[in-house]
């Protein structure tokens, strides 16, 4: 069965600090997709990134960067020079392409990391 | 603008009552999903639908029911059989069905409180 673990329940940093959110996943499939979503206080989840299992290149988008390492089954998310507007709950999620686990469709989410950026 | 609309945003109900949460999308997406979010629990899949007139149970379907009579609509009924219905409910859609390689688009959620 697929599983996503976000061990950090809550992280609090001061504005302008760099912060890394950890994500570790488990899957039996060789083809899968990893996602990060942001949930601001309004409640709606906002898509940040999708990465397929065959692309281990790190990605940078402005102050956001993602480090995908298949060897450690991790897909970590780093915010550089954090800002108060980055405060939110961040979810890592996994989707298996071939459904070898027999589970339902849709994404499997981690429990989320509540990120607090203090001014 | 295209998107997913959930209503009501806040809902209170007495124990023993059924309640229906609305989810409408104008993105022309085939697949729709209902997730439940509890503090510290992340999102858990309740039901999903890959096509009109078809839907499948997710991980925590007991005490819930859905219908998919129209492509754009996927209402969720929380029945009196659901033992702990107080939660935040999120509806989502994706372009295509099947094991999702695509992103999910989410509504703003409905917060249900049982009094």
Image (cartoon, rainbow, N blue to C red):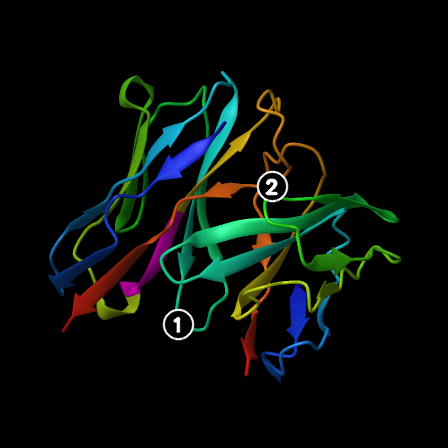
Chain under disc 2:
A
Where residue A37 appears, x then y in whole percent? Answer: 43, 51
Q: Is residue A79 above or below residue B24?
A: above
Q: Main secondary structure of the magenta part?
A: strand
Total labels: the figure holds: 2
Say which residue appears at 63% left-offset and 82% top-offset.
Answer: B13
Q: Is residue A2 above or below residue B72?
A: above
Say which residue appears at 47% left-offset and 30% top-offset.
Answer: A2
Q: Is residue B52 above or below residue B100?
A: below
Where residue A49 appears, x then y in whole percent? Answer: 43, 43
Q: Nearer the viewer, residue B94 or B63?
A: B63
Where residue B58 appears, x then y in whole percent? Answer: 64, 44
Chain under disc 1:
A
Say which residue appears at 39% left-offset and 37% top-offset.
Answer: A4
Which residue is disc 1 drawn over?
A: A41
Q: Is residue B103 magenta?
A: no
Say which residue appears at 50% left-offset and 27% top-offset.
Answer: A1
Answer few, some or many: residues within 10 Å of disc 1's Cα (few below 14, many 20 plus, some between 14 and 19).
few
Magenta residues, start to end: A86-91
Reading the chain from its start, which is encountered first: label 1 or label 2?
Answer: 1
Q: Locate the N terminus of chain B by quadrant.
A: bottom right
Which residue is disc 2 drawn over?
A: A106
Q: Nearer the viewer, residue A49 or A34?
A: A34
Q: Nearer the viewer, residue B14 or B1?
A: B14
Q: Is residue A47 left or right of residue A115?
A: right
SS category of the residue bearing label 1: loop
Q: Is residue A87 magenta?
A: yes
């Amino acid at each position: 069965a697929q599983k996503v673990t976000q061990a950090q329940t809550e992280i609090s940093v001061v504005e302008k600090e760099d912060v890394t959110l950890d994500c570790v996943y488990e899957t039996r499939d060789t083809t899968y997709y990893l996602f990060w979503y942001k949930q601001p206080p309004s409640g709606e989840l906002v898509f940040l990134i999708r990465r397929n299992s065959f692309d281990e290149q790190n990605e940078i988008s402005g102050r956001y960067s993602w480090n995908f390492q298949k060897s450690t089954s991790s897909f970590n998310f780093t915010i550089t020079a954090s800002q108060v507007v980055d405060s939110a709950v961040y979810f890592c999620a996994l989707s298996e392409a071939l459904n070898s686990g027999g589970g339902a469709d849709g994404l499997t989410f981690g429990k989320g990391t509540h990120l607090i950026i203090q001014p | 603008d295209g998107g997913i609309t959930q209503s009501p945003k806040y809902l209170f109900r007495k124990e023993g009552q059924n309640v229906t949460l609305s989810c409408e999308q104008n993105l022309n997406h085939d697949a729709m999903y209902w997730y439940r979010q509890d503090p510290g629990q992340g999102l858990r899949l309740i039901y999903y639908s890959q096509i009109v007139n078809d839907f499948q149970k997710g991980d925590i379907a007991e005490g819930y029911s859905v219908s998919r009579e129209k492509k754009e609509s996927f209402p969720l009924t929380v029945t009196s059989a659901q033992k702990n219905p107080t939660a935040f409910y999120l509806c989502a859609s994706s372009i295509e069905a099947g094991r999702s390689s695509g992103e999910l688009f989410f509504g703003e959620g409905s917060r249900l409180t049982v009094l």
